[in-house]
Amino acid sequence: MSLVVLGTVALDHVKTPSGSKKDMLGGSAAHFAMAARLFTDVHLAAVVGRDFPIKHLEFLKRKGIDCSSILLSREKTFRWRGEYKQEDLNTAITLATELGALQTYVPQLKEHQRKLPNVFLANIDPDLQMQLLKSLKAPELIGLDSMNLWINHKQKSLRRLMKMVHLFVANDGEARALTQENNLIMAAKRLRGFGPRMVVIKKGEHGVLFTSDRLMFSFPAYPVEKVVDPTGAGDTFAGGLMGYLSRAGKIDDKVLRKACLYATTVASFNVQGFGMAKTASLSMREVEERLKTLVKFFALS
C-alpha cells in the first residue's frame, strides 16, 4: 500500500571525522523516502528553491519516488550545515541553518495522494504537519517525527498534533525533553498518554525501544565498525519502519517486531557513507542478508 511523506528536502554540508561533503541531497523526507521505497510506493511532499540542482530531483525520480508534490519556490532551498565529533557521533552540532523556501511553504498534495492510507509526517514545522494531515481524506496509519527545535519552541502545536497520530518516533533525547522523564520506559508511557498508541524510541548505537499498551520490546543496533556520517539515520529508520508497515497492510505483534528489525537494518547502512551514498544503491537482498545477521545477535539457539 502506498505511502505519502511530508518533510524537508535539503542541501546538506556535513563534516565528520571521515571528511566533509557540501551540497549533498538531504532532508528528513528525502532520507525517509530513500529507505521506504525499498518496501512500497512513496509519494514525497516538500519544497525546494531555485538553487536546487535538477540532478537531485531526477535522482529521486529514478529511485521510483513520486516527486509530483515537491513544489518549486522562488526562495532558496533549505540548507543545513553540521558537524560530528569523534567523541560523540550520535550528536550533530548545528553550525548553520537557512530556512529559505520553508518560510513560505504551504504543503500541497495531488487529489489521488490525499486518499492514500499511510502518511508519515517527517521532521518539519508541526504547523505544516497539521496542514497536510487535515488535507487527507481518511488515513489509516499516521506516523510522526519531530525534533528538539519544535519541542522547545512549538510544543503546543506538537502536542495538539500528537493527539491525532497512531505512531510517534523520537530519539532518546527528544523523548526525555518532551516528557521530562529520564527513564525511557516511563518516557514512552508518558508519550503514549499524549495520544499516539505506539511509540518508538531510537537509541542510536544502543538500538530501539518499542512500546504500546499491550507490547514492549527492545532490539540492539546492528554493530557498524566505522560510522562515516550519521546524518539522516533516524529518518532512514523511520522510512524502513513505515515502509514495512505499509507493505504489510496490517499491524500485529509480529509485524511490529519485523518492522523495527527492518528499520534498524536499513539505518545501519545509512551511517556507513555520506548522505545517501549507501541507501541509494541498497537492494532488498542486501537488507535481508544483514537482517539475518542482526537476528543472530540475540538468538538463543
Image (spheres, helix red, strand yellow):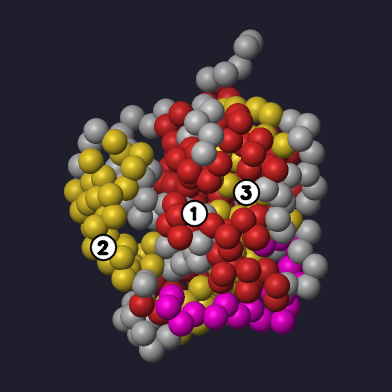
Where is 44 relative to 176, above or below? below
Q: Is 87 situated left or right of 298 in this image? A: left
Which amino acid lies under the numbered mark 1 shown in the image of this protein?
Ile
Q: Which residue is mark 1?
A: 151
Q: Secondary structure at mark 3?
A: strand
**Which of 278 and 207 lies nearest the eye of the viewer?**
207
Q: Position of residue 145 (x, y in %)?
A: 55, 54
Q: Which residue is mark 2?
A: 96
**Which of 135 and 182 lies nearest the eye of the viewer?**
182
Q: Is 139 situated left or right of 46 in this image? A: right
Which amino acid lies under the numbered mark 2 shown in the image of this protein?
Ala
Q: Which span is picked out in magenta?
A: 102-119
Q: Which residue is mark 3?
A: 168
Where is 298 relative to 143, above or below? above
Which amino acid lies under the numbered mark 3 shown in the image of this protein?
Phe
Q: How busy is the neighbourhood of tag 3: few (under 14 within 10 Å), some, or many (20 plus)? A: many
Residue 284 visible in the shown view: no
| Label whose residue precedes the other's in the sequence (3 or 2) | 2
